[in-house]
Amino acid sequence: MTIHQDARVYASLLDPDQAVRHPLASGRGAWLQLVAGAATVNGTALATGDGAAIENEAALEIRASEPTELLLFDLA
């Protein structure tokens, strides 16, 4: 799929208590969309259907509290 933007798109399936870390380069932000489940992102709780715009962070730590499916958009 072509999106005509400087973006990287990631998908992840996490088990409860499983975590992933995603570094963000200087000048980049992110959009995180929880498709299903529940997780914390840098300590902030999100549930199914929630989205989060993230700026001015060096990295994201995403930790699932139940089976979780998510999309992460790393954006310039």
Image (cartoon, grey):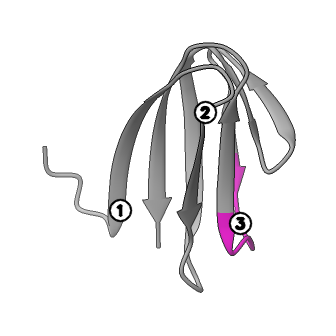
Local SS, label 2: loop
Q: Measured from the top left, where is residue 44 in percent x and y?
A: 85, 40
Amino acid at circle 3 = Glu
Q: CA distance from mark 2 to mark 3?
A: 23 Å
Q: Which residues are magenta?
A: 53-59
Disc 2 vs disc 3: which is toward the camera?
2
Residue hosting label 3: 55
The image shows residue 5, relative to residue 31, as above or below, that is below
Residue 72 highlighted magenta (yes or no) = no
Q: CA distance from mark 3 to mark 1?
A: 14 Å
Circles 3 and 1 in contact, beta carbons < 8 Å:
no
* 13 horizontally vs 51: left or right: left
Question: Neighbour class for label 1 at 10 Å: few (<14), some, many (≥20)?
Answer: some
Amino acid at circle 2 = Gln
Residue at coordinates 71% horizontally, 66% vertically from top-left?
55
Residue hosting label 1: 7
Local SS, label 1: strand
Residue at coordinates 13% horizontally, 43% vertically from top-left?
1
Label drawn at residue 18: 2
**Residue 19, located in which quarter of the rendered image?**
top right
Question: Neighbour class for label 2 at 10 Å: few (<14), some, many (≥20)?
Answer: some
Residue at coordinates 64% horizontally, 20% vertically from top-left?
16
First-in-chain label (2 vs 3): 2
